[in-house]
Image (tube, grey):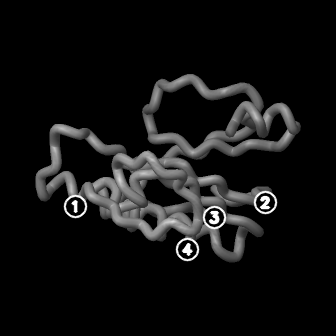
Amino acid sequence: VLALAAQRRWSVVAVVRRGSNRPLSEGVERVVEIDDLDDSTPWPTSAFRAVDAVIHLAAHVHQLKRADAAKSERFQAVNVGGTRRLAEAAAGHVGRFVFISSAHACRSVSSEVLDESVIGRPDTPYGRSK
């Protein structure tokens, strides 16, 4: 997504976890650091300054061998609560909120084409949080 944005010469504001050492793609003009993304993330209005759209891709991702209750709660706090909190904070500041999720929202394994007509039947805690 960042590469496409740079190619189209869009201004990009990247939100990263504080202390993250991951290199950013070319074209990132401003960085906003947060402690974590979950249902209690305080979003400063400055994060949305001069922003037309939010493209939200962040998530707590699944670890196939761990499906305990604490893991399930974390999926909900980040993937549901964090997304809701970000969307609410962005409302009134940006014109568009694009949420990119996962095929796991429908099911973890499928041989069929998954499009908007498919009724979701997620079968993992991660999938249910998406």
Circle 2: residue type: Asp
Circle 3: residue type: Thr
* Residue 46 seen by the camera: no
Q: Secondary structure at mark 3?
A: helix
- Asked whether disc 1 touches disc 3, contact meaning CB atoms under 8 Å apart, the reply is no
Quadrant where the N terminus sits is: top right
Q: Residue at x 63, y 64 (%)?
A: 45
Q: Which residue is mark 2?
A: 52
Circle 4: residue type: Glu
- Circle number at residue 88: 4
Callout in the foreground (3, 4): 4
Is 58 above or below relative to 86?
above
Q: Quadrant of residue 31?
A: top right
Residue 7 image position (x, y, % from top left): 84, 32
Lower position in the chain sequence, tag 2 or tag 4: 2
What's the distance in space between the residues labelled 1 and 2, CA to CA?
32 Å
